[in-house]
Amino acid sequence: MTILAVNWVNASLVALISFSLVIIVLALLIGVIKIFGKVFAEKTATLNATQTQSSAVAADAMSEEEVVAIAMALHLFYNHHDEESDVLTFRHDQGITPWTIKAISKPLK
């Protein structure tokens, strides 16, 4: 009989307010995302326009050999690997470790 003791008016009011609050916040979030999308689309459009103009000038000014030299320099700079000796060295400690304590404490059969 405890189901009848619940104040259903207050419970439904809390549920209605919480659901409506979630819907309102989601609608505001969608609006903010659309505004950011428009702002950043305008910025990228202006950046792309300036980059295409500067790249057209830069492409005409460099020869093919210069481009190859820059590409090779970048390749050598970023793809440098360390030489390793491929030799594994193990250091054996003669001290007492948990493994040796376990081996010592085992009774012999």
Image (spheres, grey):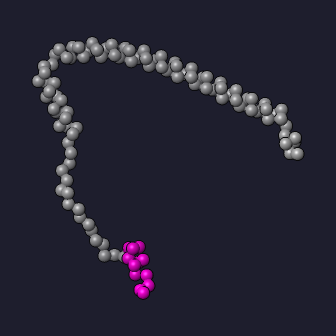
**Residue visible at 20% across and 33% down in the picture:** 74
- For this view, does 21 lie left or right of residue 91? right
Residue at (44% x, 85% y) in the render:
107
In this picture, residue 95 sits left or right of residue 59: right
Q: Residue furthest left?
A: 65
Q: Quadrant of the C terminus?
A: bottom left
On the image, the x and y values in percent for residue 92 come to 28, 71
Q: Quadrant of residue 68?
A: top left
Q: Quadrant of the N terminus?
A: top right
- Report which quarter residue 26 is drawn in: top right
Where's residue 46, x and y in %? 37, 14
Residue stretch in magenta: 97-109
Looking at the image, residue 108 lies above or below residue 62: below
Q: In which quadrant of the rendered view does residue 80 lie?
A: top left
| Residue that protrudes farthest toward the front in the picture | 109
Tell me what residue is drawn at x 85 percent, y 37 percent.
Answer: 7
In the image, what residue occupies the spot 87% across and 41% down?
A: 4
Q: Position of residue 104 (x, y in %)?
A: 40, 81
Q: Is residue 8 magenta?
A: no
Magenta stretch: dominant secondary structure: helix
Give coordinates of residue 91: x percent, y percent: 27, 68
- Residue 103 inside the magenta-drawn segment: yes
Name the side, left or right, on which 14 lies relative to 97: right
Q: Is residue 26 above or below residue 54?
A: below
105 sits left or right of 78 in the view: right
How many numbered markers are drawn?
0
Nearest the eye: 102 or 80: 102
